[in-house]
Image (cartoon, coloured by chain):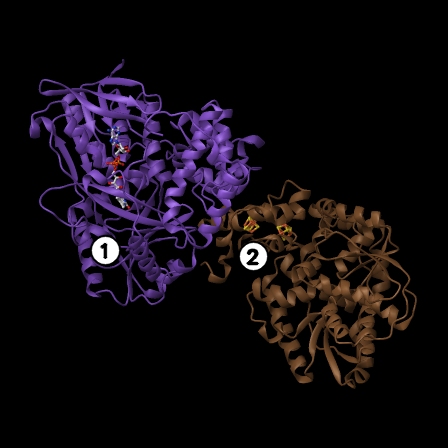
Amino acid sequence: MIKLENISFDHCIKCTVCTIYCPVARATHHFPGPKQSGPDMERLRIKSPGLLDDSLKYCTNCKRCEIACPSNVKIADLIQSSKWRYFRKAFRVRDFFLARTDLMGGVATRASFLVNFFIKLFPVKFFLDRFMKIPSERRFPRYAQGTFRAWYKKHRKEQEAFAEKAVYFHGCYVNYNNHDLGKDVVTVLNAMNVGVIVTDEKCCGVPLIANGYIDKARKNALFNIESLARSASESGARIVSASSSCSFALKHEYPNLLELDNSAIFDGLDYITRFIHERFEKGNVPAMGPVPVRAAYHSPCHLERMGGVMNTIEVLKKIPGLELTILHSECCGIAGTYGFKKEYYKVAQKVGDELFKRIERANPEIVITDCETCKWQIEMSTPYRVEHPVTVLARAIDGKKL
Amino acid sequence: MKRIETEAIVIGGGATGAGTLRDLSLRGVRAVLIEKSDIASGTTGRNHGLLHSGTRYAVNDLESARECIRENKILKKIARHCIEDTGGLFVTLPEDDPSYHGKLIEHCKYAGIRCEEVSVQEALRIEPNLNPNILAALRVPDGTIDPFRLTSANVLDAQERGATVLTHTGVSGIIREGDRAIGVRCRDRRTGVELEVFGGIIVNASGVWGQEICASAGIALRMFPSKGSMVIIDYRINNVVVNRCRVPSDGDIIVPGDTVSLIGTTSKKVEYDKIDEITVDEDEIATLLESGEKLIPNVSRTRVLRAYCGVRPLIAVSGEMDGREISRGIVLIDHERRDSVGGLITIAGGKLMTYRLMAEMAADLACAKLKVRKKCRTQKTALPGSERKLDQAKSVKFFTGIPNSVVGSTLYRHGQRIRNILHREKRNYGLICECEMVTEGEIEYALKKLNVKDIVDLRRRTRIGMGPCQGQLCAYRAAGLFVKYDSATSAESNKMLVDFLEERWKGIKPVLWGDALREVEFCYWIYQGLFGLGDVRFPEEGEDR
Ligand SMILES: Cc1cc2nc3c(=O)[nH]c(=O)nc-3n(C[C@H](O)[C@H](O)[C@H](O)COP(=O)(O)OP(=O)(O)OC[C@H]3O[C@@H](n4cnc5c(N)ncnc54)[C@H](O)[C@@H]3O)c2cc1C
Ligand code: SF4
Ligand code: SF4
């Protein structure tokens, strides 16, 4: 059955611009590029699913092709949906664990010290490499002790006291790996007289989609839509997320890829810098001290796709003392769980190469980016520390050292 | 003047002529085929590609229906790689006369066509894009047939058995000696060289043009040309043949043809002297899209790639009748008996899918005249490429390393002969046509083995330029390969490029809106803006150009 909503491939005029902009096609000849894997092959896949080429698994779903396309072809969506429509599900322990960020996080945070220690040990790395096909070169994000939600519980009362509130979708990374970012969000929003509401949530689904667990992704999505919508309508608040990929999923992957109705949250949902920028524009700018740092800003692919890069840049420009170099837009290559897989590791690093070189040339003290996986990739592949824009903003507000 | 002596001459390289050539070759008769343009460039290449089950004719023309179902079964065995056994549905729309449904079931019984009634729900499961408001549905053994592959495979087999094929060579007249036709005068339309071919028997299989051939031998034969138009949809909007269950009328059928779907057809009278100038009319396109949308609503939202038309080669039996009411029956004429001109027979009428039967009839008569006592073997002997059942999964495995899409598409087009085409050298499976997955290896094979003289011919053998971009990305690459494989000089290849784009343009022009228009604009930008192709001047040459 050809769903009417999915016939955007029919508009493709074969201009090949998408392939020119695809970072993966540039990095490896094993990937024939978005035009071929998307609209071209879709016609053949409709004729016979046996004509599916498995080379399309190289696509990282970075969506750069969709930004470039003059015909509004949902190229990356076509590729992702072909992955799970036609591939036979080969259960892989690794993919299962990589996809279940919340499950893994829930367990790891209970003994984060041990996990962080063990995962660096040579025999463990060797085992992961040999048997799980997770490359030994790959550095893992550290797990935190306890969860962000547990911290929030203690501060809920004070947050609910604010007149204006925002529902904050923190995502797995903040909950299990980086509580500080969540706290920084609270610092910044509070400084702008906005209280932070945290409601029930599940993993946004990005890693599930990437690893082909579509039913589970749909389940999570339905849960999130319902929960966020309820919480937002109760408190009359807008919804924010400080992860560019989570926001992208909630706003765009849900309707386009998972084919779910997310109209209940679509209009109320913002990536955080847009929320902040809008208020800055209206004059709601908190008092800020100087942050005298030389920083290079990297714009993540999914934020580009949402058209949100401008907001982050405008917000950063308001920070006194911050010396900002805006890097040419490049993909870092990690693409969520992609760079954790041995078969793609080399491609991921090659994709990121151009970005790493540009960072080097900018000679910064730190790198700023909106996406947690970009952060892992850059920190692993360059000598620089990477911070979230909200964190930098929070330091300007609370005056602590960045 | 060049002179060729042979046993039998076949005029016309449509399915009928090609089939006759093969049939004769299988019986050991030396034969020469003469075609004024390319193989399958006449009506054969301009039809709907439906492998009828006979159901459509069951009510009005039982004889044709019986022929269809018989040939349908034979072709599914001998021409596997030219056929897709998709199955077909006859669906009744709310506005259609509901009684036709029952009538059809009854007549299918007489004709021996397996026709089962299926529930609307089941029909929608078989073809999910179907209009959900249909009232009733029948399932029949319709299929699809690719005319280009079918004709080419017949020619290939004949050539491998020793037959001679002269394409781009037109017959300008029959040479008579007393009351016998003893040969033909022809002219190579590319080089202008004249030649004469002599043989013991001449089979006129030139379709609707047969009237002219007969006239040149002093024989009166009247054709009744009826034009039919079709539109091509960008991708397969249906996977089984969808027919409307009513008295045959315009826009009744949607056929899934390879990667596209075809809506057809119309039926319009044309004057005989206009048969080489026919074009698709606006009202025909409107009719086809309107009726198509009623069967499959998706039609309204999908890009139309092109429109084309063909002329039905019906021999007027009597008076003025509507094109569709004339029997599509096969007409075999022994001009010795009818007109007292020996050495000439005409085979015409029928359908693409009855080509084998027509060829058998013509070859039987030709052999009788030549006193060759050999039986027809075409009902049992598979065409080259169709020798064994095709298994995509096995081929994909055999060619590990080459993309599935390439292996699958090549296999679909050439069947068993894929082994002569693909190999694991990178250059071999590099893509030339990205829409239809045509590789350099496939083009090389076509240039060397399949009588390809220009890019239009190449398109008929491979599907190059038949996808959504209509040649935009592949045409210039193909032109380069003609030079690389010594099939043309670079000046000739430039000219071919222009001719090919003109030929594509002709079919796009009637449907110039929406995405097709954007596509053409981009194509123009490449070929004119970038290459300046319109400003290249070519020396004057043969009439064919
Ligand atoms: C609109 C339409 C839809 C159709 N749909 C179907 C269908 O779905 N299924 C089906 O089975 N049938 C269908 N048919 C019928 C089918 O197309 C024809 O019956 C069949 O193709 C006739 O083949 P042929 O070889 O007899 O004639 P042609 O294909 O016309 O072959 C005649 C050849 O002779 C050549 N020639 C002419 N003059 C000369 C000359 N002087 N010298 C040398 N060569 C010459 C021509 O170039 C041509 O190639 C359809 C027909 C039409 C018009
Ligand atoms: S989503 Fe990214 S990797 Fe995938 S095809 Fe598009 S540009 Fe290439
Ligand atoms: S950019 Fe868009 S229109 Fe151009 S080839 Fe890619 S999908 Fe087609």
Q: Secondary structure at mark 2?
A: loop
**Which quarter of the rendered picture does the C terminus of chain B lie within?**
top left
* Residue A199 horizontal/vertical position (percent): 71, 77
Q: Residue at x 69, y 70 (%)?
A: A270
The brown-coloured chain is labelled A
Q: Secondary structure at mark 1?
A: loop
Chain for numbered disc 1 = B
- Pick the front one: A43 or B63: A43
State the mark number for residue B249.
Answer: 1
Q: Is residue B350 visible?
A: yes
Q: Amino acid at mark 2?
A: Lys
Number of labelled discs? 2
Q: Residue at x 43, y 25 (%)?
A: B448
- Pick the front one: A175 or A250: A250
* Residue B366 horizontal/vertical position (percent): 17, 25
Is B359 left or right of B79, judged from the image as shown?
left
Q: Is residue B283 above or below residue B201?
A: below
Is A44 left or right of B171, judged from the image as shown?
right
Q: Is residue B139 above or below residue B417?
A: below
Task: Read off the residue under disc 2.
Answer: A74
Is A177 left or right of B13, judged from the image as shown?
right
**Which quarter of the rendered picture does the N terminus of chain B lie within?**
top left
- Pick the front one: B120 or A285: A285
- CA separation in Å, label 1 and label 2: 39 Å
Q: Residue at x 75, y 48 (%)?
A: A352
Q: Quadrant of residue B95?
A: bottom left
Circle 1 Cα neighbour tier, 10 Å, few/some/many (<14 / 14–19 / ≥20): some
Q: Is residue B421 visible?
A: no
Chain for numbered disc 2 = A
Circle 2 Cα neighbour tier, 10 Å, few/some/many (<14 / 14–19 / ≥20): many
Q: Quadrant of residue B413?
A: top left
The purple-coloured chain is labelled B
